[in-house]
Every structure is written in C-alpha cells, then in structure tokens.
Image (cartoon, rainbow, N blue to C red):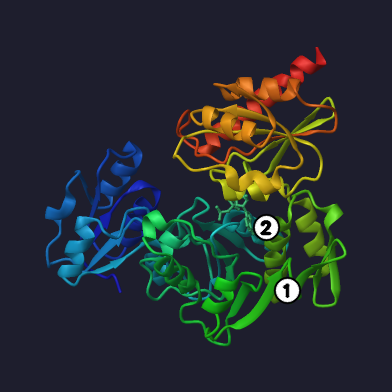
C-alpha cells in the first residue's frame, strides 16, 4: 500500500518518528514536518534513512497534489490548515496506528482498549494477565509506545495489547482489532472533537470491520456504550459493577457468569471503577481460556498505575495516596468514592475557572481540605461554603507537611487535585513524583 508512495508526516515526536522509520522501508519519498526542533539522534537516524525533515510553523506549502498520503500525529487538530488542504486536494489523511496496521504481520492478535476513563489502567491489567500466557505479549499505543514500533517485533501468534485514545481513532480506516474493549463513554475531550456525537462516532470505530468472529467487551452500565454498540456484528461480552452482566459484582466478589473469580478484599487497587477495569481483563483472559487461579493471581498482584489512586506509603498509621492524574472534578469524585475512612484532601492546581460544587455529595468523609496552587483561594471559599476545615498553601511540599500535621492515625491523605498541573508543573506525572518525594521526606522526619 505504501510502496514508492509520496508521504507527508505532520508532527514528528515519537509516533511520527516511528511511522517514518517503518515507512522508509517501503518508499524513499517521505517528508516529516514539525513546528519545533526534534531530538537530534532521531533526526540523524531518519535523514540517514533518506527521510527529509522540515521544521516550520507553517507547513502548508509543503503539500501539493503529488502526495499520496498525509500521516497526521493524533494530537494535532483535524482542523489544521494542512489537513484542510489535504482534504481539498483529496489526499488521504491517516495516522500512525493505521500505518502500523497495514505493516504488521496479519497473524498478530490485536486487542484494542478505548473509553473515556480507565484506558491506561485496563490496558495495563490486560497486559499483566495475558503475560502469564505462554506467548509473546506486547503493550503499546497511547500508553507510550507507538504501534509502529512493534512492526518488526511482533510475529504471527503474538498478542498486541493497545490503548487507543479517541484522537487515534480519528484517522483510521482499515484498522481492525480481534478483541475491542470500551470501558465507558462520557462527555470529555470536546475541545478536540467539538461535539459529543462526533466524539462517540470516533470512539466506536474501535469496533470497525468486526464480524461475529471478533469480540466486543462492553460496559452495559453505560447507556451511551449500550446504544452505540447496538448494531455491531461482534460477539458481545458485557460487564458492569451496577447490574447483572457476563462479568459483575456480587457480595464483595467479582464473578464471571457463575464463577467467583476474585474477592475485592484481595485487591491492591481501590474503587468500583477499578472493579470494572478488572472485569474487562477477566473477559479478555476468558477469550484465551485462562485458568481462574492464574487470572486471580495476576490481578491481585497488580499494584495499579502510577499517579492513579496510587498507594505511596504508610507514615505513622496514615496512608498517603497519589492521584495526580485527577485533573478534573469527575475523577476526584471517583477517588473520594474509593475510600470509606476519614480523608485529608489536597485539592488545587491550574485555575480553569471550573466550579468545585460537584464534589459536595462525596465530601462526607473529608475532614480537612488543603487548598493549594493557583485555585487555592477559590477552593478555600468552597471549603468555607460546605463548612469544612481548610487551609491555603502555595506549594505541594507545604501541602503534604500540613496534611500530615492535620491528620489523625488511620486517616487517608489524598492528593486528588481536580485541577491540571500546569500552574506549577509541566505535567501530572512530575506533580505526582514531587508529591511522592515530599511524602518520602516526611517519613524520614517521622522516624527521627
Ligand atoms: P485514561 O487512560 O482513560 O485516562 P486511567 O486508567 O489513566 O484512564 O485513569 C484515569 C482516571 O480515571 C483515574 O484516576 C480514575 O479517576 C478514573 N477512572 C479509571 N477507571 C475508570 C472507570 N472504569 N470508570 C470511571 N473512571 C475511571
């Protein structure tokens, strides 16, 4: 499909780099363009493969009717002027996932995971369980390793577990999975997709080209998932923590049909949302006829994904959790619902002007709020309005110190900021690491 074709790759980073490397084996007619300077080693390597690299803020001039494909980085808006031009010239716009699909060995089994929330956790869980099969299993996609990086590695019979974000489903056409998982659908990412309908339409492409030989794992507790998958041809397996499904929750245990698979008390990850992520992993494992004892073992061993309600440490009978990934009120609600003991909550970060009132029904266990970052004053006002004790601090380090001071033995101290990190940090990962560092330092103080 790509032999001797002329291809423009818009956006380099890791996925453009991997796509260029893979495509360079099929054509010498590739230009990669990006608005900012790229890693020198990657640039050198691509140039040596005959790829042209153009760094420019206005790449539109690079495209003319002589091109066969544009490969767009998933993060770039589909309204980009170069994409508009490609459309007017009737040049096909695809992405790195679509490129990889065409170049991967057709015998590789693909498992695709999408959804509004829980993609990374579910993808990691599925990977951890399937790793216990006697097969080569790889994990990639939105989780950090571009799909193109598996083209040379994955062989027929191997399994590729892929986290596929909505952005990555936008420019796929032939991409097809063997097993697709959709965790849930909520109104998010509308800044990118503009309307919820368009977002849902793209998300549901995870089931593209499915026949009755393929498997769809769907959340029947989510009405948009149910209505969106009504007409798909796949063999459906359902899960829900709210109602009876193929995988469900009953008497503090997770069941697959009549089989009691795991008791929730044996899990290291918290919250009903995680039970649903686990159900996805069980349903995938069942497709490979895995033994219940092995499935249980892998899931009970799973420590969770860094920065998602991650247990950090116990200090003087207080348990510290890092939920730095929580960048909005909805995910802080999910975190609050995961604990039933008393909580000291660290809230705050970038001020996007969003209200915090949505937290109120879930604040019963919160006895103290540490208001931190750019939103500290608004959170302080909010805390007053719901009659919660609170204090304002500037830095995360001070927030940790004070949370510790105001806590009691047996409390949970939770960073679940409900705000993006960009007021003080480059990303939520760095914020989470800073938090953990501050918690580590506390421990030393406590043991002096
Ligand atoms: P994603 O990759 O889709 O962003 P993550 O696994 O990174 O999802 O989890 C991000 C946050 O989403 C978690 O901290 C948690 O608050 C919430 N979450 C995780 N799984 C679910 C789920 N199944 N349903 C609802 N919320 C979830």
Q: Which residue is mark 2?
A: 125
| Mark identifier at residue 126 | none
Q: Real-space Cα distance between discs 1 and 2?
A: 14 Å
Q: Quadrant of residue 119?
A: bottom right
Q: Secondary structure at mark 2?
A: helix
Q: Decide if residue 305 is in sight here.
A: no
Taking depth in this image into account, of 60 and 424 the one nearest to the observer is 424
Q: Quadrant of residue 319?
A: top right
**Is the C-beta of the residue carrying label 2 under 8 Å from the nearest atom of ligand 1?**
no
Taking depth in this image into account, of 227 and 149 the one nearest to the observer is 227
Above or below 211: residue 24: above
Above or below 273: residue 355: above
Q: Earlier in the sequence, mark 1 or mark 2?
A: 2
Horizontal and vertical percent position of residue 407 = 78, 26
> Which quadrant holds the C terminus?
top right
Q: Which residue is mark 1?
A: 286
Horizontal and vertical percent position of residue 371 = 60, 28
> Which quadrant holds the N terminus?
bottom left
Give yes or no for contact between labels 1 and 2 (Cβ–Cβ under 8 Å): no
Horizontal and vertical percent position of residue 257 = 80, 77
Q: Quadrant of residue 156?
A: bottom right
Give the residue at x 54% y 60%.
116
In the displayed structure image, the side of residue 97 where residue 220 appears, left or right: right
Horizontal and vertical percent position of residue 162 = 54, 62
Q: Secondary structure at mark 1?
A: helix
């Amino acid at each position: 499909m790509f032999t001797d074709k002329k291809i423009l790759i818009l956006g380099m980073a890791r996925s453009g780099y991997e796509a260029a490397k893979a495509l360079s084996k099929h054509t010498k007619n590739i230009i990669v363009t990006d608005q900012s300077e790229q890693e020198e080693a990657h640039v050198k390597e691509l140039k040596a493969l005959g790829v042209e690299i153009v760094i420019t803020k206005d790449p539109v001039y690079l495209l003319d009717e002589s091109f066969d494909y544009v490969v767009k980085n998933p993060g770039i808006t589909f309204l980009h002027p170069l994409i508009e031009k490609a459309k007017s010239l009737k040049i096909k716009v695809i992405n790195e996932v679509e490129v990889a699909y065409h170049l991967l060995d057709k015998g590789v089994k693909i498992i695709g995971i999408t959804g509004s929330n829980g993609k990374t956790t579910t993808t990691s869980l599925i990977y951890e369980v399937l790793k216990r099969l006697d097969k080569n299993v790889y994990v990639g996609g939105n989780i950090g390793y571009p799909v193109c990086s598996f083209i040379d590695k994955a062989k027929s019979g191997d399994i590729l577990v892929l986290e596929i974000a909505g952005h990555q489903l936008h420019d796929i056409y032939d991409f097809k999975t063997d097993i697709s998982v959709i965790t849930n659908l909520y109104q998010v990412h509308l800044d990118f997709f503009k309307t919820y309908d368009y977002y849902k339409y793209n998300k549901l492409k995870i089931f593209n080209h499915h026949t009755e030989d393929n498997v769809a794992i769907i959340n029947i507790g989510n009405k948009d998932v149910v209505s969106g998958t009504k007409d798909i041809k796949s063999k459906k397996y359902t899960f829900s923590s709210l109602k009876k499904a193929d995988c469900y929750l009953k008497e503090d245990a997770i069941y697959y049909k009549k089989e009691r698979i795991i008791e929730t008390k044996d899990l290291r990850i918290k919250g009903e949302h995680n039970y649903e992520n686990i159900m996805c992993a069980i349903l995938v494992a069942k497709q490979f006829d895995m033994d219940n004892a092995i499935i249980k073992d892998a899931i009970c061993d799973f420590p969770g994904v860094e920065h998602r309600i991650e247990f950090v440490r116990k200090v003087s009978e207080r348990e510290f959790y890092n939920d730095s990934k929580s960048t909005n009120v909805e995910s802080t609600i999910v975190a609050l619902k995961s604990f039933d003991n008393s909580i000291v909550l660290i809230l705050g970060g970038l001020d996007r002007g969003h209200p915090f009132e949505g937290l109120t029904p879930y604040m019963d266990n919160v006895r103290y709020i540490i208001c931190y970052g750019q939103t500290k004053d608004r959170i302080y006002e909010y805390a007053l309005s719901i009659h919660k004790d609170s204090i304002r601090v500037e830095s995360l380090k001070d927030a940790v110190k004070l949370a510790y001071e105001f806590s009691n033995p047996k409390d949970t101290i939770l960073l679940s900021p409900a705000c993006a990190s960009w007021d003080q940090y480059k990303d939520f990962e760095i914020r989470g690491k800073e938090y953990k560092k501050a918690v580590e330092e506390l421990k030393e103080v406590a043991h002096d």
